[in-house]
Image: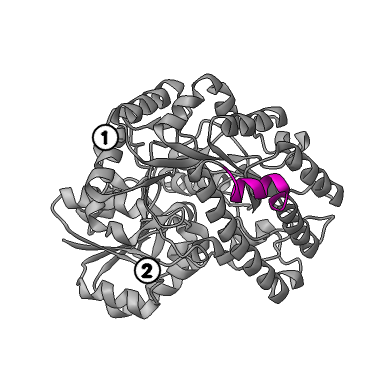
């Protein structure tokens, strides 16, 4: 069967500003198993360029696909683009089956099928095994777990698919990309990889635990050797780990570090982890550095203990600060995110946030806004708050989309920008960016500073044009509907009724 993987362009500032692109890892994870099953698979990555609608769909049509798979890692903010593109895609390929996957359609499958008649099927959750089964049963979808489709014109979902236990059982379709077209970190040839899936923690604003079911990891030796192959065969210099928490298992993570050190690869790894894990591993952090780890993102999610408890983060300010210091002492960079947009915030909280971040003394910082995704406990906590931006393209963690009761949106924005400016303009930060003795760290700091400056200016211009005029709109519960857990319960009740009647 001829299958085309379509990766739509992402409109987020963070995707457009750097001028660099990483491969669409999620689609590559589907491409490998499909190729191994004997299908003729092609990839159209509209993020490169980016391609216009007409350009991208012309490439798709040229492959004459019988099936088109659409997905994007920025699932929520990319959905409006997908909804627009499938209309023209259906017009150009009236007989092709269109399959849509990702986090947003997984949890909003009913709304997507009702509002996008062009979409034939939705893959819910992990897709490697589900997509293999679905393309072989397009006319009998009821036999395939983990999908949603229309039956007699009404959206229905099959039972959830089983969790993938062996992550090494499905290979990545690396042959679908041109490695020379993908870079990151200021021109370094780069790819995304995933050592593990899931997260054992229960932060209220995050849906990873529900989507991935539980934390699992790949075989450390096989994973390290795949990195070695990518470097030796394709010249890859940088690996961006897409894991939520790659360091969750001390044993598995240590095995990966040991194998990377044994392979002696001139590659760099960047990713995300928890400050607790960095503190836990303080005695082996030299191995992190020796294995090629250059930067870890640490999510602070606010610096007040009250906020940390409210979102069930599980961390402490003392460990956050210690983790930053430990990374720096061992030749690595700490990128610290700070989240705003929680209901209890006041102006004084932002002032305290600035003071606390200065005490943390992070190498790099990144601001994010809390987003009430429907599949998270934070959604239920925010149900009565007002939505101030109903354009899902801006539900990307870089825009405030729900009101803070005691602080108007324009002042939240000004606080965030002032905090960023105050931290990045410190003498210590400037020294690390321009005079640091380690050339790798100096390059990383300069690249991040250049990118941050451009993002800052773009966000400021957007604020003057749009953000400062935002006004409260519908309540969160009205805008997005019932929570996922309640929706699932309603679905089960609907399914029980016919059984009682027939009995």
Is 74 on the left or on the right of 179, as rendered? Answer: right
Q: Indicate the position of residue 174 as horizontal and vertical percent values.
A: 25, 51
Q: Indicate the position of residue 350 as horizontal and vertical percent values.
A: 80, 49
Helix or strand or loop: what does disc 2 sit on? loop
Q: CA distance from mark 1 to mark 2?
A: 30 Å
What residue does disc 1 label? Answer: 225
Residue 337 visible in the shown view: yes
Q: Nearer the viewer, residue 355 or 377?
A: 355
Work out whether 414 lies above or below 118. above
- Disc count in the image? 2
What residue does disc 2 label? Answer: 46
Work out whether 493 lies above or below 149. above
Does the magenta portion include 429? Answer: yes
Residue 171 visible in the shown view: no
Q: Indicate the position of residue 274 as horizontal and vertical percent values.
A: 57, 33
- Magenta residue span: 423-436
Q: Nearer the viewer, mark 1 or mark 2?
A: 1
Q: Quadrant of residue 102?
A: bottom left
The quarter of the rendered structure image containing the C terminus is top left
The residue most toward the left is 38
* Dot 1 and dot 2 residues touching (CB under 8 Å): no
Q: Nearer the viewer, residue 209 or 20?
A: 20
Question: In terms of sequence position, does the residue under pointer 1 or pointer 2 come before the other?
Answer: 2
Residue sitting at 76 percent across and 69 percent down? Answer: 471
Q: Indicate the position of residue 103 as horizontal and vertical percent values.
A: 46, 52
Mark 2 packing: few (<14 Cα in 10 Å), some, or many (20+)? some
Q: Nearer the viewer, residue 14 or 56?
A: 14
């Amino acid at each position: 069967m001829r299958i085309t993987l379509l990766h739509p362009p992402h409109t987020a500032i963070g995707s457009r500003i750097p001028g660099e692109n990483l491969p669409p890892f999620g689609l590559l994870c589907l491409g490998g198993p499909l190729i191994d099953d004997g299908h003729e698979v092609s990839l159209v990555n509209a993020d490169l360029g980016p391609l216009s609608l007409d350009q991208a769909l012309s490439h798709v049509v040229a492959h004459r696909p019988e099936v088109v798979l659409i997905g994007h890692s920025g699932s929520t903010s990319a959905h409006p683009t997908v909804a627009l593109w499938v209309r023209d895609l259906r017009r150009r390929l009236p007989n092709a089956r269109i399959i849509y996957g990702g986090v947003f359609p997984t949890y909003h499958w009913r709304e997507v099928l009702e509002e996008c008649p062009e979409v034939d099927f939705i893959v819910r959750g992990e897709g490697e095994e589900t997509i293999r089964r679905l393309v072989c049963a397009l006319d009998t979808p009821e036999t395939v777990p983990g999908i949603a489709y229309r039956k007699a014109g009404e959206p229905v979902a099959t039972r959830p698919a089983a969790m993938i236990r062996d992550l090494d059982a499905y290979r990545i379709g690396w042959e679908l990309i041109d490695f020379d077209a993908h870079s990151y970190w200021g021109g370094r040839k780069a790819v995304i990889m995933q050592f593990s899936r899931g997260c054992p923690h229960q932060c209220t604003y995050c849906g990873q635990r529900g989507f991935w079911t539980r934390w699992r990891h790949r075989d450390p030796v096989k994973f390290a050797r795949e990195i070695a192959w990518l470097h030796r065969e394709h010249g890859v210099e940088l690996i961006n780990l897409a894991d939520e928490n790659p360091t969750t298992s001390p044993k598995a993570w240590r095995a990966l570090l040991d194998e990377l050190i044994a392979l002696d690869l001139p590659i760099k790894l960047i990713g995300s982890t928890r400050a607790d894990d960095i503190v836990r591993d303080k005695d082996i952090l030299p191995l992190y550095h020796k294995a090629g780890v250059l930067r870890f993102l640490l999510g602070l999610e606010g610096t007040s203990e009250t906020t940390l408890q409210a979102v069930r983060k599980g961390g402490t300010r003392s460990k956050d600060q210690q983790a930053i210091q430990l990374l720096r002492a061992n030749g690595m960079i700490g990128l610290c995110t700070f989240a705003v947009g929680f209901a209890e915030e006041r102006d004084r909280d932002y002032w305290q946030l600035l003071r606390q971040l200065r005490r943390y003394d992070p190498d790099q910082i990144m601001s994010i806004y809390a987003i009430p995704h429907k599949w998270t406990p934070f959604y239920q906590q925010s149900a009565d708050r007002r939505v101030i931006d109903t354009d899902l393209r801006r539900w990307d963690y870089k825009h405030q989309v729900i009101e803070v009761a005691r602080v108007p949106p324009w002042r939240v924005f000004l606080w965030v920008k002032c905090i960023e400016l105050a931290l990045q303009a410190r003498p210590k930060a400037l020294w690390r960016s321009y005079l640091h003795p380690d050339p790798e760290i100096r390059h990383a700091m300069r690249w991040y500073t250049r990118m941050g400056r451009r993002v800052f200016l773009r966000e400021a211009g957007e604020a003057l044009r749009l953000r400062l005029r935002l006004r409260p709109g519908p309540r969160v519960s009205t805008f997005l509907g019932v929570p996922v857990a309640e929706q699932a319960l309603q679905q089960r009740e609907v399914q029980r009724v016919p059984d009682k009647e027939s009995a």
